Image (tube, grey):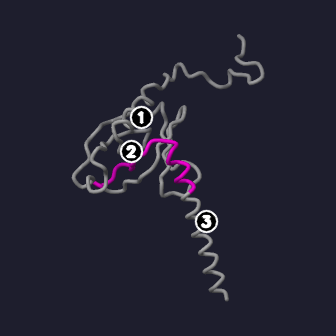
Amino acid sequence: MLGTILIIVLACLVFFGALMALGRFLALRSSGIPVVIRSMPNPDGRHWRHGVLVYGGTRARVYKLRSLRPESDISVSRQRTTITGRREITARESNFLEAELHILCLEDGDSRWEFALDNAGDTALVAWLESAPSERFVRPLSRIDPRHGLERH
């Protein structure tokens, strides 16, 4: 009897986990740019994860397709992220990455990433990073009073 209950509970957990993963996949599939990403350092051809890159005002978020987390798995800052290089995919990576992809190497503070993107994804990411306002021009939110607009000096 106890074994049957455990099997039923386990089956329900698997079912709801699969349902959550499917819901996440369907919700994210049309909301961003497909990307394959990995943290660095990693050996050649290892630890790549498929995901969706979604741009925001100050952060870009990566949602891994095989994750059940409700929030993003990776987040990069628009102000701190720099492109440190580009490269073509290696022979080993060509076994599982599409031929039209190339790799962008990024740094965000102490984190280093590689993003495998097509030309359109590369252009979108570079444009998003380069269009960031200078930190000198980012006004603190405390100057805005939601009831009356900007403060008067």
Q: Residue at x 36, y 56 (%)?
A: 47
Residue on which the image places disc 2: 113
Q: Which amino acid lies under the numbered mark 2 shown in the image of this protein?
A: Trp
Q: Residue at x 54, y 59 (%)?
A: 21
Q: Which mark is residue 115?
A: none
What secondary structure is marked by label 1?
helix
Q: Residues within 10 Å of mark 3 (few under 14, many from 20)?
A: few
What secondary structure is marked by label 3?
helix
Q: Earlier in the sequence, mark 1 or mark 3?
A: 3
Horizontally, is 75 left or right of 113 in the view?
right
Q: Which mark is residue 125?
A: 1
- Distance between mark 1 and mark 3 Cα atoms: 34 Å
Q: Is 59 rendered above or below residue 152? A: below
Q: Earlier in the sequence, mark 2 or mark 3?
A: 3
- Distance between mark 1 and mark 2 Cα atoms: 13 Å
- Distance between mark 2 and mark 3 Cα atoms: 32 Å
Q: Which amino acid lies under the numbered mark 1 shown in the image of this protein?
A: Leu
Q: Nearer the viewer, mark 1 or mark 3?
A: 3
Q: Which mark is residue 16?
A: 3
Residue 19: horizontal and vertical position, in percent? 58, 62
Q: Earlier in the sequence, mark 1 or mark 2?
A: 2
Q: Quadrant of the N terminus?
A: bottom right
Q: Residues within 10 Å of mark 1 (few under 14, many from 20)?
A: some
Residue 15: horizontal and vertical position, in percent? 59, 68
Query: Which segment is the magenta one?
Result: 23-45
Residue 128 lies in what quarter of the image? top left
